[in-house]
Amino acid sequence: MLYRERHRRRTDPTISVEMPQMIPLHRDLAFYQLLADSYARLLGRPLVQQAMPLAEATEWLYEHAPFAVLAHNTDPDPLFIYGNKAAQRRFGYSWDEITRLPSRLSAEAPNREERQQFLARVQRLGYEAGYKGVRITKSGQRFMIEEATLWQLLDTNGQLHGQAVVIPSTHDL
């Protein structure tokens, strides 16, 4: 869907430019499909256990999943591009805040090297399950993530779009 944005200039009263309407990734069915399909291809099991229509599964994962899901992009200093409500609650950020956060800031400075090694292993192998590590909230509270699964966000053409993680269990430190 496109919308028209009007700009004014002295010499030309209006110029019409078509720009794509931005859909937040938590409502983007294609992004959910990328998350779910890449997870299923690499791990051999579904991301969402209940069979449901695509739009319903997209909403369930964002709004109601009992586990945290985060994804970051492929930038040299990757930014989170997705964090479901469970992740937002655990890390203490809103959607707008978490989707502007460099993912490295989810770990304390002393733990960032270990986190980087984990990300590199996933890049080589496609995914890793059973990960545990210390993370921090927006307010600085430390907590342990356990049994996390990180995987490459690869589309059906093999194009890399980032990495995503499911965090089923955490506890405060």
Image (spheres, rainbow, N blue to C red):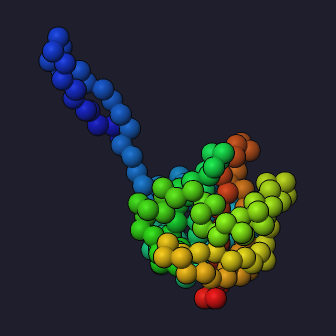
Q: Image quadrant of residue 135? A: bottom right
Would you place residue 162 above or below residue 151 in this image?
A: above
Horizontally, is 144 left or right of 43 in the view?
left
Horizontally, is 154 left or right of 57 in the view?
right
Q: Is residue 125 visible?
A: yes
For this orientation, the residue located farthest to the front is: 110
Q: Residue at x 60, y 81 (%)?
A: 142
Q: Image quadrant of residue 158? A: top right
Front-most of 112 and 76? Answer: 112
Residue 163 in the image, given as x and y percentages of width and height = 67, 57
| Numbered marks: total | 0
Q: Is residue 161 visible?
A: no
Q: Image quadrant of residue 129? A: bottom right
Residue 17 in the image, given as x and y percentages of width and height = 30, 26
Residue 80 in the image, given as x and y percentages of width and height = 56, 58
Front-most of 93 and 73? Answer: 93
Front-most of 40 and 116? Answer: 116
Horizontally, is 13 left or right of 170 in the view?
left
Front-most of 136 and 83? Answer: 136
Q: Residue at x 64, y 69 (%)?
A: 107
> If the image is split into quadrants, where does the C terminus sit?
bottom right
> If the image is split into quadrants, where does the N terminus sit?
top left
Q: Residue at x 41, y 68 (%)?
A: 94
Residue 89 in the image, given as x and y percentages of width and height = 47, 78
Would you place residue 38 above or below residue 19 in this image?
A: below
Q: Residue at x 18, y 23 (%)?
A: 8
